[in-house]
Image: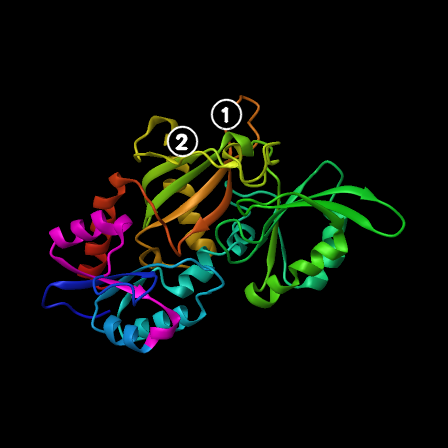
Amino acid sequence: MKSLDRKAQIALLWRGDRAAGAVARNPRLERLASSLAANEIQVTEVVYSDDSTEEIRAELLKMDGVLVWVDPLSEGASRVKLDALLREIGSHGVWVSAHPDVILKMGVKEVLHRTRHLGWGTDTVVYRSAVSLRTQFSGRLKMNEPKVLKRNRGNGGQGVWKVERVATDHTAEVVRVLEARRGSVPRTLPLSEFIARCEHYFHQDGCVVEQPFQARLAEGMIRCYVSIDRVVGFGHQLIKALLEPPVEGPDSPAAQPGPRIMHSATAPQFQQLRSLVESQWIPQMIETLDMRRDELPVIWDADFLLGARTRTGADTYVLCEINISSVLPFPDEAVPMIVESVAGRLNRGE
């Protein structure tokens, strides 16, 4: 990382239309940008597009660091060119959060398999080829025990499927599938046909992960926001993904998820989860993934579903995914701690 003898310069980068205007602004990042500036960190907002990599490279090489908000998949675009660019500028001493290599460790669905032995884990299987999915998945799919298949990289529910066996005859095994993408409807088709439709996931992402469907899904998802290794807030949302669409239809108001209700890190109802995340699961994850603490992003989140209750009625938590590529929005209360993490990272030069 560059040594600093002047005011630090940070780029806030997201995907957009570079030709839309001379001054780039992302309203969702305005408070963070203002707080960084108030802490003597110079902020440049950079709009990324695949057809402007040379121009963006020159701009980012002037920075001490870059904070990135770009989804893995967006309207047919991937991060292939961006990740190559970020690796290049990182090799020149520009600090990148989150670095593409860190995303490949933490921000992919395979992390659910690699960390399945932690307290947030469940019965998780990874398939590394369409052949293994075709030959092994059928034997794990029992009647009335739906599974969830997840492509390794994605967002917005793309490539996340609830799969349940509905019939088996002498010619075909029939499944009912529902994608987590908003507006999806269930489809019934032969298992072999569904697996064939998933084959491109392996070409693009390397693997597919399987988890049990969580029966308490309708009680909502808890998003735990983290800056490096400190919990900085929570979001609770009544999601509708992978739940049966209402009779009014998949695009009706009844089919839309509820608002994500933001809470501070000290919210009483989440203190058990906070303690587990900070004191046990993050340290164990770092060890399992062979990472260093200073590699952790300045803002990331872990999505949890409620698992089966214990014998005493206490909640358990199942990790659904870790988001690193584009964590927006986040609680307002998280901003000062994100700024503190950025300043500490720049000042230490680790």
Answer with left or right where residue 35 lies relative to residue 178: left
Crowding at mark 1 (Cα within 10 Å: few <14, some 14-19, many 20+): few
Answer with left or right where residue 219 lies relative to residue 341: right
Count of numbered labels shown in the rendering: 2
Q: Nearer the viewer, residue 312 or 74?
A: 74
Residue furthest top as drawn: 312
Q: Which amino acid type corresponds to the residue marked 1 in the rendered image?
A: Ala
- Classify mark 2: helix, strand or loop: helix
Q: Nearer the viewer, residue 314 or 216?
A: 216
Which quadrant, please, contains the N terminus?
A: bottom left
Q: Which residue is mark 2?
A: 272
Residue 260 point in image, percent of width and height: 39, 36
Numbered mark located on residue 27 in the image: none
Image colouring? rainbow
Q: Is residue 26 highlighted in magenta?
A: yes
Q: Which amino acid type corresponds to the residue marked 2 in the rendered image?
A: Gln
Which quadrant, please, contains the C terminus?
A: bottom left
Crowding at mark 2 (Cα within 10 Å: few <14, some 14-19, many 20+): few
Numbered mark located on residue 314 in the image: 1
Q: Is residue 272 highlighted in magenta?
A: no
CA separation in Å, label 1 and label 2: 10 Å
Residue 171 point in image, percent of width and height: 88, 52
Q: Nearer the viewer, residue 26 or 9?
A: 26
Q: Is residue 276 above or below residue 21?
A: above
**What residue is at 51 percent from the left and 54 percent from the top?**
111
Q: Which residues are magenta?
A: 24-53
Sequence-first disc among 1 and 2: 2
